[in-house]
Image: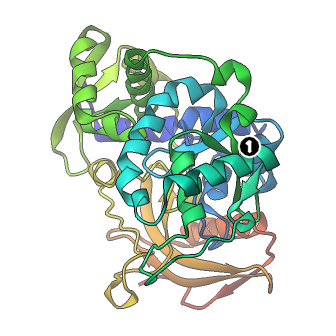
Amino acid sequence: MKIANKDARRLWLAGQGLAQNPTGALDVMGIIRSLGFVQLDTIRNVTRAHHHILWSRNQNYREPMLGKLLKKERAIFEHFTHDASVLPMEFYPYWRRQFGRMEHATAKWFAKGVSDEDVEEVRQRIRADGALSTKDFDSKVEGEKEMWARPPHKRALDMLWYAGELTTCHRENFIKYYDLSERVVPAHHYEHEVHDDAQIDWLCRAALDRLTFATQGEIQRFWDAVSAKEAKDWIAANSADLVPVELQAADGSWATAFAHTDIEARLDAAPKATSRLRIINPFDPAIRERPRLKRLFGFEYVNEMFVPAKDRQWGYYVYPLLEGDRFVGRTEIKADRAKGILSVHKLWREPGVKWTRARAGKFDAELTRFARLAGIRQIEWLCQQTPD
């Protein structure tokens, strides 16, 4: 089955919840389930990445809603996909293998500067006192303070969190509070045992379901909870349930991938992307897989937050601009919540894109909506409003 580039973009954006207008009845859990996970990030440039990602799918979303799902409803849990993320709580039984994988992967890093006694002390403190944060401990880094150095209690907390023994029960001002998993995860999920083979099958199947079409590597990297060999073996064992497809890239070339057997029905049902212009977060799942982004949209994007300022091509926190099924530009914006100002530092258009009056109006409207999410009314331009 051959899928033209225009159709591949339509399928991908529809599956990512970015084809429809981001309005209507809000179902936050529905969005998280559809995406599979939402990445967490500490940086609050305008709003934190997880809030922006959810808001992009429905602009009735507001920042306190995610915390309520975590603390009060126990509808989500936090753990590590390719990075720290929130996942639906019903996925917990299929995530057990990831606890073991992450415990093994981080063992060497945590071994330095923390002892078995440190770990046991943290474990017993939480067992006796209930949920605690890193502020409730006072151990210090000993010796030379190297980059990424952590005091023993912080290493112990992270070690137990990665291993699944501790779970984030809530956050205050984005500070994580840890408790025993058995006291946080609802019993019917915590006690539900799933064989490892069934976990692999669920993870690969669920990844392809959310990707719509994918290579072996994309299936493996989606959750980053199975190995490359496990993904390869899963494809071989389930070949009768998969449809080989040829996908046209933005440059006209073709490449092979896999899809579920309902791919034709998905193609028929996928709506044409709305003409709305959207400010997309750098951590949005729609753009996370950079080779896929370039292949489908011809859009090259690098997150330069950790690139030295002198070496950046664009800027510290730069947002791609998606209009319909096309990336038309990028912008560097920043919020000062204390002053109530959203400032536009830079605006670029992509090659071949004309910055028309209509497009400028769409961008202005999205800036206003985005500022409103952060409780800001004033927008300040620090660059020309028409990009070169």
Count of numbered circles on the image: 1
Q: Position of residue 283 (x, y in %)?
A: 50, 58
Q: Please determine whether, in this image, residue 244 is positioned above or below residue 98.
A: above
Residue displayed at 43% across by 84% down = 144
**Does 144 sit left or right of 245 as displayed?**
right
Q: Look at label 1 and name its amino acid.
A: Arg
For the point 43% across and 58% down, the residue is 110
Q: In this rendering, would 57 be left or right of 127?
A: left
Its colouring scheme is rainbow
Position of 203 relative to 367 (above/below):
above
Residue at (76% x, 68% y) in the render: 374
Expressed as whole percent of the image width and height from the top left, the position of residue 133 reads: 72, 59
Of the pair 235 and 134, the residue shown nearer to us: 134
Residue 367 place in picture, x, y as percent: 66, 70
Residue 227 found in image quarter: top left
Quarter of the figure that contains the C terminus = bottom left
- For mark 1, what is the residue? 127
Compared to residue 127, the image places residue 275 above or below, namely: below
Picture quadrant of residue 42: bottom right
Inspect this view and state whether residue 274 appears. Answer: no
